[in-house]
Image: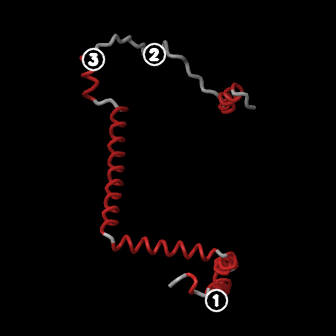
Amino acid sequence: MNYNDIAWLPVCGGLTAVGLVLTYLAFRRRGAAAGLRAAAWSLLPLAAYLTGAQATLWNIGTAAVRFVTGLVLSPLAWAGVAVAGLSAVLFVVSGAMRGRSLSRARTPRPGAAEAAPAAAPKAETPKKVPTAKTAPRQVEQPAADDFSEIEDILKRRGIG
């Protein structure tokens, strides 16, 4: 069947008429919002005919049908689908492997901490641990001062 063999006005007009009947039912059963949405969908076939868009829709439909029938009936196409699937699996596996290697690099292993000083001795400086006498006193601030830090940051940025 060819595009020019079809009388498009009766087809599009008929689809619009059937859609408008269903629109009436939608108005009665589900309310105005559903009815208006159904009316919008119902008018699309007639709009496609009047604008000439049905020719483009016909070409898209026939191309999709040719692609699917060529895919289903062609062993070469199935080989291409298999290669695409293999590619997708390789992407997923490589992403998982990369994620593991990045997480290993971020977190030190328990054995690595013991082996590191033997491999490369470092001069570590002793850190002072604050005691009750040397630790700075933390004074609880009232709730109104909770925003003072934020206000300071905003002022430094020129905001506010």
Asked which secondary structure carries label 1, the reply is: helix
| Residue that extends furthest to the right in the rendered view of this protein | 160
Question: In which quadrant of the rendered view does residue 21 lie?
Answer: bottom right
Image quarter hosting the C terminus: top right
Residue 13 screen position, x and y as percent: 66, 86
Asked which secondary structure carries label 3, the reply is: helix
Amino acid type at image mark 3:
Pro
Q: Please indicate whether residue 31 sits to the left or right of residue 97 in the image.
A: right
Q: Which residue is mark 1?
A: 10
Q: Which residue is mark 2?
A: 130
Q: Is residue 35 visible in this depiction of the protein?
A: no
Amino acid type at image mark 2:
Pro
Near mark 2 (Cα within 10 A), the count class, few <14, some 14-19 or many ≥20, is: few
Spatial CA span between label 1 and label 3: 86 Å
Residue for point 47% across, 72% down: 64
Question: In which quadrant of the rendered view does residue 48 lie?
Answer: bottom right
Dot placed on the residue nearer the N-terminal end, 1 or 3: 1
Q: Is residue 118 visible in this depiction of the protein?
A: yes
Closer to viewer: mark 1 or mark 3: 1
Q: Which residue is mark 3?
A: 117
Spatial CA span between label 2 and label 1: 89 Å
